[in-house]
Amino acid sequence: MNFAKLAMRRSLCLAVILFVAAMAAEAHHSFAMYDHSRTLTLKGTATKFQWSNPHAYLEIDVHDAKGGVKHYTLEGTSINMMQRIGWRSNMIKFGDSIKVVMAPVISGEPVGLLLEVTLANGETKQLGVPASDTFKRTPEQEQRP
Amino acid sequence: MIPAKASRRFSRRIRIIAVGLLTLSSFSLAYAQAPQTAASIPDITGSWERARDASIPAQPQPPLKPQYQKEWLAKTQAVREAAAKGAPLADRATLCLPEGMPAMMGATFPIEILQSKGQVTIIEEAFTQVRRILLDRPQKAIDDVEPGFYGNSVGLWEGSTLVVDTVGVRENVVFQNAPHSANMRIKERISLGANGILRDEITIEDPEKLEKPWTFTFGYRRIPNYTLLEYICEDNREYADEKGQQKIRVAAPENPGK
């Protein structure tokens, strides 16, 4: 099988997976704008945890070794869904040191879909993203920002 | 000293009064909990979640007339392709709009059913959607119902099945992207199965757009001790751009939420 055929088959498979995922989410808007092929792990400082619907948002500042700061906006799921899996609004506070695993937005902006958070107390929590297994996790050492 | 015979008579009277009071109080308690008196009416009050049970048939595509079917297939294809490219099309949920009927019965989030005198109320947690089914009343003429998200619903218990008729759903409130006319009628048969699964068999009648009535069924399972949560669609940072694509605002707004 040549490469083009293989790539086509792969993208077809992906389309089917995405369609099924979209059908599962039904009434909710799509997460298709996020890259399903890789994740980024960020360690940073929480500047805002917005507890709202349709989705929660987490704002974080990520400091690099040269003293620079990059700000990221991370989209969560519905706070109703989050509450049903044990989330509370006070779990992330301004200034908390946290680690997140996110799927970056395809457009390249500093935005991501939040898949997992390690809270300041060391506890790791998932976000309950529908069909979250369709987001391929990248091991931390292989990541490119 | 009270003679033994009088004492027995007295205690028998006390027993009769006590039994009478107990019967009366349990009667009024039962009345307060289930105003419908017919024994066949099931108690469906409480919280339910969507159940994809084997007894529920798979949902068929809308049997649209050929000219609408073509548009529907093109739209479905466009939605699918846009999502596969990572540039999804915005939809009504992007705009924070509630689903309306019949989509809300799909229960993306849990629903709560309340049976009260002359009315069955259904609340869907997502978007805090509420529909009221007025019992034992004639349906209005479609022209007498102002078009809305939920329409005008009337129902009656046929034995243990709640039969509901809904008209007056706005034409831009669509389910599965299927177009409908202002004359659409939604018929429902809601019944509780022996397996504890509540079924809502929905039939959409719309001779202007459909070749034949479109029937599908949603199933629900009870969630004991679950209280529906608040849901206000307050700040969707995703929005529809001028091309109808779903985009995300990067900067945080001043102060929605906390």
Image (tube, rainbow, N blue to C red):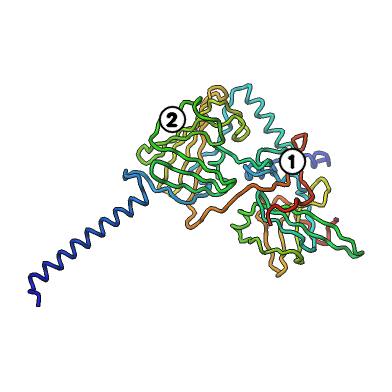
Expressed as whole percent of the image width and height from the top left, the position of residue B119 reads 42, 41
Quadrant that contains the C terminus of chain B: bottom right
Say what secondary structure mark 2 lies in. Answer: loop
Residue A12 visible? The answer is no
Residue closer to the observer: B38 or B146: B146
**Which of the two labelled residues, at mark 1 and mark 2, occupies the earlier sequence position?**
2
Q: Chain of mark 1?
A: B
Residue closer to the observer: A53 or A7: A53
Q: Are marks 1 and 2 on the same chain?
A: yes
Label 1 sits on residue: B246
Amino acid type at circle 1 is Gln
Residue count near mark 1 (Cα–Cα under 10 Å), binned few <14, some 14–19, many ≥20? many
| Residue at the image position 35 percent from the left and 39 percent from the top | B159
In this view, the mark in front (1 or 2) = 2
Quadrant that contains the N terminus of chain B: bottom left
Say what secondary structure mark 1 lies in. Answer: strand
